[in-house]
Amino acid sequence: MSEKNLTTVIRDSLKYQEQESAKAVLGEMGSWLLIILGALAAALLLNTFIIVNAQVTSGSMEHTIMTGDRVIGLRVSYWFETPQRGDIVFFKNPDDESEIFVKRVIGLPGETVEIKGGVTYIDGVAIEESYLAEPARELDFGPYTVPEGCFFMMGDNRNNSSDSRYWVHTYVQESKILGKAYWIYYPRFESVE
């Protein structure tokens, strides 16, 4: 074999190896791109259909949920059942739907809610609220008769909570409830129950 032919064979071999290396790099990059796109799609689907999360920006739920806590819950919680009194839920603010609020369900559809002397009454019977941050100020509100398909919400920090007692649109429609809150995941991990 002549030196010229040997040089051509070596050059062709090197070109082939470079092409194969480039294909391998592109294949690896394509694999990573697919993994990243798959992860983004899964996160989007989870956040849209399965989970709901929010950062609490006020002290309205203290001491159950503190200002700055990040809370996560499940949208699927109310696919087959309705919210119950005492549930902590995520919902669209009835006065500004661009905001997500986290509050406790107090009044159910058809019930009459009244606050007398800082004590909450449902259909004339005082309810036990061991989750309150402190005794509520002895103020009177209501009576409010909760319409069908709606709920009356209040924060656990009754003395510092913008809730159904103060909103222009007093009640939260069931269709505006995004899910039930279950866990604080930042800055600590714990149940909200």
Image (spheres, grey):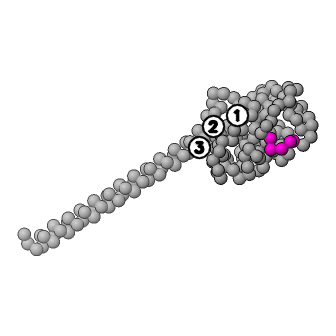
Of labels 3 and 1, earlier in sequence is 3
For the point 86% across and 34% down, which residue is it?
120
Q: Which residue is mark 1?
A: 175
Q: Secondary structure at mark 3?
A: helix
| 39 drawn magenta | no
Q: Secondary structure at mark 2?
A: helix
Q: Which residue is mark 3?
A: 47
30 or 100, which lies in front? 100
What predominant SS class does the magenta segment belong to? loop
Find residue 132 and report its horizontal and vertical position in percent: 80, 41
At label 3, counting other C-alpha atoms closer than 10 Å, the crowd grade (few under 14, some 14-19, many 20 or more) is some
* Left or right of residue 174, residue 49 in this image: left
Contact (Cβ within 8 Å) of mark 3 with mark 1:
no
At label 2, counting other C-alpha atoms closer than 10 Å, the crowd grade (few under 14, some 14-19, many 20 or more) is many
CA distance for labels 2 and 1? 12 Å
Q: Which residue is mark 2?
A: 75
Find residue 104 and report its horizontal and vertical position in percent: 75, 38
Question: In the image, is residue 53 above or below residue 84?
Answer: below
Find residue 176 and report its horizontal and vertical position in percent: 71, 37
Residue range (magenta): 132-136
* Left or right of residue 30, residue 7 in this image: left
For the point 60% across and 41% down, which residue is it?
51
At label 1, counting other C-alpha atoms closer than 10 Å, the crowd grade (few under 14, some 14-19, many 20 or more) is few
- What's the residue type where badge 2 is placed? Arg
Query: Foreground mark, 3 or 1?
Result: 3
Q: Secondary structure at mark 1?
A: helix
Question: In the image, is residue 149 above or below residue 36?
Answer: above
* Left or right of residue 90, residue 36 in this image: left
CA distance for labels 3 and 1? 17 Å
Find residue 96 and report its horizontal and vertical position in percent: 76, 45
For the point 56% across and 45% down, which residue is it?
44
